[in-house]
Image (cartoon, grey):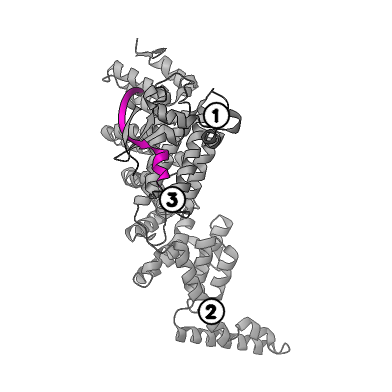
Amino acid sequence: MEERRDYAVLRFVDQNGWSYMVNDYAKGCSLMEYIKQGIRVEKETIFDWIRQLSKQLEQYYRCGNEDAAYGYVNPYAVIITGDGMLCLLDINEPENEELLKQMKKKKLRMLFVRKERVLSQKTERSDDLYGLAKIMEFTAEKCLDPKAFTRKEERVWKRMLGKCYSSGKNAIKVLKNMQKEIGFLEREMERPRDNVSAKKILLAILAVCIMSAAIIGGTVKKPETKAIAANQDQPEAGVQEGVKEKKETKEVVEQNGDSPYLEMGLIYYVAWEDYVNSLGSLDKEMQETEFSDAYRVVIASLEEGSIQHEDGLNAEDAVKKILDELEKRAEKIQMKVYLYQYPLLKVSVLEESEKWHRLTKRIGEEMIRRQAWYRWDTNGEKECEVRKYLAESYFKLGENLKAAEQYEQIRKLESNEEELEEIYEKLQLIYEEAQEYEKVWEISREAVEVLPDSERLWMNYLERYCENPEMERELCAEAVKKAIQAVPELAESEAFKQLQGKYKIVIDGENIRVGE
């Protein structure tokens, strides 16, 4: 183990939206020295390192002038302490001369500095981000197994690298987004996972269905083929032969168990949205024709994007018929609830009317009660989608607090920032109408912490502060300062200027006054 020693480092303290730098000492070794020992670590450790570094660089920028850059981000400029915490080296402190000499070597600069900057002493924030990206690649290569990342983690990792390599402006925003991305990955790893993926389950079911279909197909020819092959001069004989063969096929299916075509049809839609093969498989169903005909109306409606009617059966009646039948088969389809109910949920949101909102509510509640996504959901997306549809149905039916219950769950699952922004706004609206003002404040504060770059959420936050006559004006001024610190461009927006005039907000450098 590399001997630890004291290094002069930088530490940061956040207060009232501002960051303050403190010169300190830490016992440890450089990240480069740590990596040279050949120690393998878990990917959670790598994520934590990058989260710490991105946070500290962000803090460094927030306590300096607008163009302040750290100067030279590389593994020798990062100290790792005994408890696994990282600190930025104080590169202006002569006591760190030993590491500073290592940092100046051209061979190292070639690895962590843009080629055109290797011989230059001038540094910008874009150079810091470039160095951070190189540290990310370096630590992943040296400390992780080659296949440590899942495909989703790999996508997020590459997205963060791309932002670091291409961004020369608004470095603070890039670093904040990186912290959110890593936070999302850490939450994903904490979620319980089943070893069997949804796709594997679907493929397994489909394989069984195909084998069953092959057995049936090999036993009896399709009735339409037999009818066509019949004597064309005696069409009645052909029809009778076709009916006879359909009956024989049905008997074979009954002897071999459940017909495979119904589930095949559902899998083609749920897994791949393959309407042609889905409808084709449902057409071949011979044992449960009424059930498959009802699903056929559902899938046809989804294909057209509007409610359809077929052979005297409309989609609404088809959905109700299927739901009633599924209640009878609750035990039989226990592990396939998602397969059978997802098409119903999707068709129920095609039309805006109370009767369809009530169907969405019925389907969504049943899927949540039975956790239909269990074993089918690897990243929370399916659960999130079901809860969204249910929440919207509650909202449209005027059951707002029930909608809020779902939105509370969704905000823990949602990774799309725009969607999450909308969810926070809906929660604030619902709780405000219900006069649950403590909840409004709680959601408002959390919203700007989770999405610190959202102008809309900051404007909501400031409006709530400033419109409250019981709120001290000094606290309102602190809120305004915090918002501008997080989103500097907010001060130039038209919405903020209107707020500024409405509540007499005066900005004089770092001095902000409200209500004067």
Q: Position of residue 462 (x, y in %)?
A: 37, 24
Give the spatial CA distance, label 3 vs label 2: 46 Å
Circle 3 residues within 10 Å: few <14, some 14–19, many ≥20 = some
Amino acid type shown at disc 2: Ala
Q: Which residues are magenta?
A: 19-37
Of labels 3 and 2, earlier in sequence is: 3
Circle 1 residues within 10 Å: few <14, some 14–19, many ≥20 = some
Q: Which residue is mark 2?
A: 213
Amino acid type shown at disc 1: Gly
Name the residue rendered at 54%, 61% in the picture. 272
Q: Which residue is mark 1?
A: 168
**CB within 8 Å, label 1 to label 3:** no
Amino acid type shown at disc 3: Leu
For residue 417, say whether it is visible: yes
Q: Which residue is mark 3?
A: 144
Q: Position of residue 99 (x, y in %)?
A: 42, 31
For residue 423, say whether it is visible: no
Circle 2 residues within 10 Å: few <14, some 14–19, many ≥20 = some
Q: Quadrant of residue 11?
A: top left
Of labels 2 and 1, earlier in sequence is: 1
Q: Is residue 407 left or right of residue 283?
A: left
Name the residue rendered at 42%, 12% in the picture. 509
Against 229, residue 122 (above or below) is above
Against 142, residue 128 (above or below) is above
Of labels 1 and 3, earlier in sequence is: 3
